[in-house]
Image (tube, helix red, strand yellow):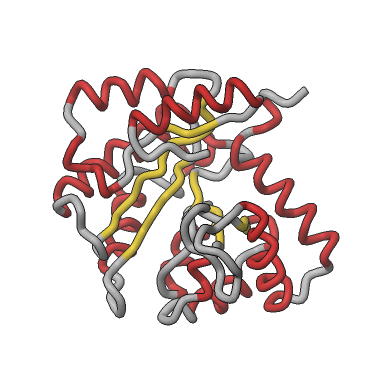
Amino acid sequence: MPGFDIKTTRQGLEFGRRHGLRTTVGVHPHYASTVDDAMWAEVRELAALDDIVGIGETGLDYDRGFSPREDQLANLERHIALAYETGESLTLHCRSKPGMRDAQDDLVCLLREGGAGSPQWLDRFGDRPPGVLHSFSGPVDYAEAALELGFFIAFGGLVFRRGEEASADVARLTPLDRILTETDSPFLKPRKVKGSRNEPKNVAVTANWLLDLRGDDAAVFGQALVDNFDRFVGASRWSG
């Protein structure tokens, strides 16, 4: 349950405590221009809670551009530093306008400048990845750069949209121990799925798409998704 601002993070914490779930804390790029010192102090305070298993959803969105780019870049820089400080994995949103890749290029640049992929980051995160490219969108070499930095790649309903054809190539090249699937419900409903809202059950649609592309054994693939998720959230520290 990723948060995308303070309000949704607190709602996620309340819901999770009722149902035995965890959440993340962060500010989505759409809201980057609203972040002041007081809000960031609250993000840092929440990030220290045991209920928090990740930093985000954050990133860059040059497609809709609800916040100025300079605010998005500053917001992302702070989240990258907080992820390293806390040892909690990043959940990264990244969108460019159709046919463009400037958001993806800027995101990789900021990750590298923040130290991602360095020996210090590897020591800090251990078996956990430093982050995931949430609902993947972008060119193949962008995915390759993220994989080199140790990141996971998650695929959702966005892969079925026109203009996202590169996602199929990325799905084939992503190692089995670095892949996740998601719904991003209530958004990004896969094609031909009935109803106006996306639902968690539709994760099976994307999972089957991945299986058809990759040719993995279904049981092995399914177990890998479970194991990858557990690694991503650091489940070993709070399971049992």
Q: Taking the image as drawn, is residue 85 in sight?
A: yes
Left or right of 158 on screen, residue 106: left
Left or right of 29 on screen, residue 135: right
Is 217 drawn above or below residue 151 in the view shown? below
Q: Nearer the viewer, residue 39 or 179?
A: 39
Is 35 drawn above or below residue 219 in the view shown? above
Left or right of 148 on screen, residue 106: left
Q: Position of residue 224 (x, y in %)?
A: 75, 54
Is 193 drawn above or below residue 58 in the view shown? below
Q: Quadrant of residue 46?
A: top left
Q: Residue at x 26, y 65 (%)?
A: 63
What is the count of numbered marks? 0
Q: Taking the image as drawn, is residue 124 in sight?
A: no
Q: Position of residue 132 (x, y in %)?
A: 50, 51
Q: Position of residue 240 (x, y in %)?
A: 78, 22
Q: Position of residue 85 (x, y in %)?
A: 40, 28
